[in-house]
Amino acid sequence: MDDFNVIIRPLVTEQGMHFANVKSAYSFEVNKKANKAQIKNAVEKIYNVKVEKVRTANRPGKYRRKGRTYGQTPSWKKAVVFLKPEFHIDLF
């Protein structure tokens, strides 16, 4: 799997920005088939930083209703990447 296919997008939220400033932890939406080693390598190559650890979570899709029909939003995978203290990522 290519490094640019592992990372889908960064998750920019209030809580994510707080963790980035306090703990040097950044959140990303990643490919559902990617493992922690692939995520670590992709972040290190794309952003030129050193990763300390990676935490992942599978986020199930939510059920939605439109009229009489029910559907489900897509499931996705979230990764929180902790960087070494001397590194940071400029998202803005």
Image (cartoon, rainbow, N blue to C red):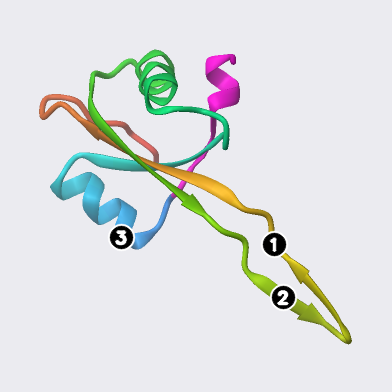
Instruction: Give the answer, above or below, for where 51 lies relative to 19.
Output: above
Dot placed on the residue nearer the N-terminal end, 1 or 2: 2
Q: Residue at x 40, y 13 (%)?
A: 45
Picture coordinates of residue 38, whole percent (x, y): 44, 20
**Which residue in the protein does label 1 denote?**
73
Q: Which mark is residue 64?
A: 2
Dot placed on the residue nearer the N-terminal end, 3 or 2: 3
Viewed as shown, does residue 8 lie left or right of 54?
right
Q: Report the Cα–Cα distance between label 3 and label 2.
A: 25 Å
Instruction: Assign a secondary structure to mark 1.
Output: loop
Viewed as shown, does residue 58 lie left or right of 84?
right
**Which residue in the protein does label 3 denote?**
15
Q: Quadrant of residue 35?
A: top left
Instruction: Give the answer, above or below, for where 76 lies relative to 14.
Output: above
Q: Amino acid at mark 3?
A: Gln
Please say if the residues under marks 1 and 2 sit with CB atoms less than 8 Å apart.
yes
Picture coordinates of residue 42, whole percent (x, y): 44, 19
Q: Which residues are magenta?
A: 1-11
Please say if the residues under marks 3 and 2 sit with CB atoms less than 8 Å apart.
no
Viewer-closest of 59 and 80: 59
Picture coordinates of residue 78, whole percent (x, y): 45, 45
Tell me, yes or no, whether the highlighted magenta stretch contains residue 10.
yes
Viewed as shown, does residue 47 lie left or right of 6?
left
Q: Report the Cα–Cα distance between label 3 and label 1.
A: 23 Å
Quarter that holds the C terminus: top left
Instruction: Give the answer, above or below, for where 49 lies relative to 17.
Output: above
Q: Residue at x 11, y 29 (%)?
A: 85
Instruction: Assign a secondary structure to mark 3.
Output: helix
| Mark 3 Cα-neighbour bin, 10 Å: few <14, some 14–19, many ≥20 | few
Viewer-closest of 66 and 10: 66
Tell me, yes or no, whether the highlighted magenta stretch contains residue 26.
no
Q: Residue at x 72, y 66 (%)?
A: 72
